[in-house]
């Protein structure tokens, strides 16, 4: 199995007038092709910053990130990102938002329109091509975000707590949806969350982060078949086990 | 069938053993001709921890707002202790989804605020404040300003502020919504502990079925709009509850099936 | 998987609700503006009649407006005066747009440009347009140019300020999103930052135009022989108070109409703005 992402000794410290704040310490991880990796951590543990560094939106203080063996030097459509807050251009329709990446890269109109329509079908938003973001519900907006990331044909998808601001039931719905979308071609995914149930439901492998300064405390394989059952005994055992290892961030 | 019969008798026993605190009678709320609440009828019992769950978009927030008298009902009435609910006479506490601390007051001042407005005697205020701060683990933060606190701490201050008023009813609208799950369970334990100590009547609204099963003595399940009470479930599991326990799972699955829209 | 109806953020039209009792809700609040306006008019009339201060009565003002509308002032019909003022403001406005918005947006986008222009701008910013009148006369004489310059000063400042803040505080998240899609710096500027700043830029345009219009009087103090501001000045010279008040009303009314027009344009140019609260 090809290794898509490798993080070597990533460290991140913020230097402010009040002093230093160490956010990430010696992060080492690797993600294989077609893997659905979940990074789980409590409220403030630097997991978003870790994802931003992998995406190239922020730079590490030391250490490096490799994409298929080559060092990462900034954001690129090869590492597609879905953000926690809605990052859609409010002045563009759903289909224009999805086409944004290809358009910036100069893909001809016909091609990108065709691909965008396929993606809209994939994420289940048929009929909403010409809608504006403000007309959509939270779950739908995130689906547009996912389609947009896919549109650039990324090698890996980075998802930063995309369902964090949704209510519990919409969240369950979206978790099913994301797996349905993912199952189509099993694109490599790094999914960040603070929700243990979500981690066990979605991930092939779950990395548990500590509180600040963030380190990778533990790792769990979740070999269960999908679709998984939240109230199945095996599921609950995984949940229980992982819950004991996550730290409480008051 | 047997299970249904036994749960109906459980319900009846539960209700018979309790005193009514709040009665909601034929509550209707419409915005022009859009019917949101449709003849809602239920009782809340004294000292009860009642949870309300419902599918997404079922008018829960409208429901709470009408209950708290923040919105006028179109028809129907809400009675507290047999008398029509009146914010001036009755003490209706409300905990919102977002923390609502007074930014220029310290934690202690925030908690005392309502009592001082009611002009309670100083030693009574001190006594209650100290006790609630102790119960909710805020004593060491007493001199902090809200902006120095994390949002979970701020929310706890709001909850403390409400408990200390010994309200007729405490309405809580998903106060733990955005917090991570481990923290949520910790805070829920704290809330239950405080409730067991002070025994106010609590109405807790949430989307999260597991949360409801974890905390509630009784759960009301709302239907889609136009909203009515679809079902009612007693949760008589012993505390502390465990989400992995088979009987817990059974209740949770039962309610999920009733609500599941996805 | 079919999209469940509940997912959509649109309330389904439920069975219509028919209230059992028809309560007539008459809101006194709606009447208040009419009452207050009538009261103000009444107070004006009383003060004018009793000559507590030198003020024409509403009747006299209306008479004067009629006379001006049907006749001429200083040899020109009323609409010509209005037209001249509007023309001056329009020219000044367009020049301000062409200079102010690029300047403001570039200052917001590029720190170096901000550091170069900001100190100079901050010094000139508090100087009111009317203070420029003497220099304007000195440099440009007493023709149209100095008048347009004064109005331009009024338009210019808000446009720069608002374009700057719109750019500077454009949502960084959108910028990050476009970066992960592979946008170059200039692509970010044109595709993300500029549209994101548009509501703010347009607010600057609105403020600029309104402020510019208010400078018309100051501008037409420079030896004007026509214009809405000129009407007030003429009224002052010939000691016709009704003309003064008429001129003020005309300026006020036109300013009001401009504001309505701009509010309409806002809906056209930035239709997404209001709903962006979710």
Image (cartoon, coloured by chain):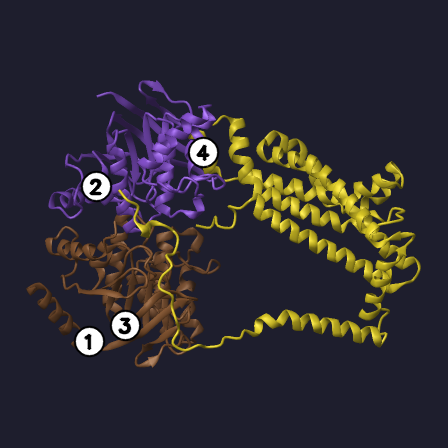
Chain colours: A purple, B brown, C yellow
Give the residue displayed 62% in from the left and 51% down from the top.
Answer: C263
Q: Report the mark closest to the observer, 2 or 1.
A: 2
Q: Report the mark closest to the observer, 3 or 1.
A: 3
Q: Chain of mark 4?
A: C
Give the secondary structure at mark 3. strand
The tag on residue B102 is none
| Labels 3 and 2 in the same subunit | no
Would you name the residue on which mark 4 appears? C176
In the rendered image, residue C119, in percent from the top left (x then y), is placed at 68, 36
Residue A99 position by quadrant: top left
- Quadrant in which the N terminus of chain C appears: top left
The tag on residue A201 is 2
Give the residue at the far top of this rendering.
A69
Disc 3/disc 1 C-alpha distance (Å): 17 Å
Disc 2/disc 1 C-alpha distance (Å): 40 Å
Is residue C141 in view from this perspective? yes
Disc 3/disc 2 C-alpha distance (Å): 38 Å
């Amino acid at each position: 199995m090809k290794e898509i992402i490798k993080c070597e000794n990533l460290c991140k410290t913020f230097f402010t007038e009040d002093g230093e704040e160490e956010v990430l310490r010696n992060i080492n991880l690797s993600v294989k092709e077609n893997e659905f990796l979940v990074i789980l951590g409590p409220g403030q543990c630097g997991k978003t910053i870790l994802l931003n560094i992998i995406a190239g939106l922020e730079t590490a203080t030391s250490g490096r990130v490799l994409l298929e063996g080559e060092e990462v030097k900034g954001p690129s459509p090869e590492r597609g990102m879905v953000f926690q807050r809605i990052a859609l251009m409010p002045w563009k329709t759903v289909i224009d938002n999805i086409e944004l990446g290809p358009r910036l890269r100069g893909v001809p109109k016909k091609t990108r329109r065709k691909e965008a329509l396929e993606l809209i079908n994939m994420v289940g938003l048929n009929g909403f091509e010409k809608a504006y973001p403000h007309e959509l519900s939270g779950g739908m907006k995130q689906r547009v975000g996912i389609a947009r990331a896919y549109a650039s044909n990324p090698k890996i998808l980075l998802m930063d707590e995309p369902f964090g601001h949704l209510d519990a039931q919409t969240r369950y719905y979206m978790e099913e949806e994301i797996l349905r979308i993912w199952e189509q071609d099993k694109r490599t995914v790094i999914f960040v969350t603070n929700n243990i149930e979500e981690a066990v439901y979605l991930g092939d492998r779950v990395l548990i982060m500590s509180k600040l300064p963030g380190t990778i405390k533990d790792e769990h394989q979740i070999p269960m078949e999908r679709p998984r059952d939240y109230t199945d005994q095996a599921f609950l055992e995984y949940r229980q086990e992982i819950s004991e290892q996550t730290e409480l961030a008051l | 069938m047997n299970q249904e019969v036994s749960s109906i008798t459980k319900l009846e026993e539960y209700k018979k053993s309790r005193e009514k605190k709040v009665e909601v009678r034929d509550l209707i709320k419409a915005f022009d001709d859009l019917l949101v609440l449709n003849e809602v009828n239920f009782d809340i019992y004294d000292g009860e921890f009642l949870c309300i769950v419902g599918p997404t978009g079922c008018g829960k927030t409208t429901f709470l707002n009408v209950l708290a008298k923040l919105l006028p009902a179109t028809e129907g009435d809400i009675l507290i202790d047999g008398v029509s609910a009146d914010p001036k006479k009755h003490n209706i506490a409300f905990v919102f989804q977002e923390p609502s601390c007074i930014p220029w007051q310290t934690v202690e001042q925030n908690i005392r605020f309502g009592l001082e407005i009611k002009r309670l005697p100083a030693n009574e205020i001190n006594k209650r404040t100290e006790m609630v701060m102790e119960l909710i683990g805020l004593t060491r933060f007493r001199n902090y300003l809200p902006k120095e606190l994390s949002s979970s701490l701020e929310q706890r201050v709001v909850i403390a502020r409400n408990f200390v008023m010994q309200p007729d009813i405490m309405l809580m609208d998903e106060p733990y919504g955005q917090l991570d799950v481990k923290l949520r369970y910790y805070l829920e334990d704290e809330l239950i502990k405080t409730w067991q100590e002070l025994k106010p009547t609590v109405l807790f609204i949430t989307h999260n079925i597991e949360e409801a099963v974890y905390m509630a003595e009784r759960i009301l399940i709302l239907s889609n709009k136009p909203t009515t009470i679809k079902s009612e479930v007693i949760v008589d599991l012993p505390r502390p509850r465990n989400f992995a326990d088979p009987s817990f799972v059974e209740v949770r699955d039962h309610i999920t099936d009733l609500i599941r829209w996805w | 998987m079919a999209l469940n109806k509940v997912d959509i953020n649109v309330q389904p039209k439920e069975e219509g609700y028919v209230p059992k009792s028809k309560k007539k809700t008459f809101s006194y609040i709606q009447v208040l503006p009419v009452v207050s306006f009538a009261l103000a008019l009444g107070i004006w009339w009383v003060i004018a009649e009793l000559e507590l201060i030198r003020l024409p009565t509403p009747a006299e003002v209306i008479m004067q407006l009629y006379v001006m509308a049907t006749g001429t002032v200083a040899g020109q019909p009323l609409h010509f005066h209005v037209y001249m003022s509007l023309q001056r403001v329009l020219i000044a406005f367009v020049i301000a747009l062409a200079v102010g918005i690029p300047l403001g947006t570039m200052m917001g986008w590029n720190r170096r440009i901000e550091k170069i222009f900001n100190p100079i701008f901050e010094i000139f910013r508090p100087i009111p347009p009317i203070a420029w009148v003497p220099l304007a006369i000195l440099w440009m004489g007493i023709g149209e140019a100095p008048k347009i310059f004064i109005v331009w000063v009024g338009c210019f400042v808000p446009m720069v300020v608002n374009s700057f803040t719109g750019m500077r505080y454009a949502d960084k998240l959108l910028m990050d999103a476009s970066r992960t899609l592979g946008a170059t710096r200039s692509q970010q500027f044109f595709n993300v930052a500029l549209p994101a700043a548009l509501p703010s830029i347009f607010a600057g345009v609105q403020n600029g135009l309104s402020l510019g219009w208010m400078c018309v009087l100051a501008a037409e103090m420079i030896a004007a022989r026509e214009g809405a501001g000129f009407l007030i000045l003429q009224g002052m010279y010939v000691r016709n108070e009704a003309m003064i008040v008429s001129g003020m009303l005309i300026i006020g009314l036109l300013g009001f109409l401009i504001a309505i027009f701009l509010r309409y344009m806002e809906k056209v140019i930035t239709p997404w703005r209001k709903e962006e609260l979710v």
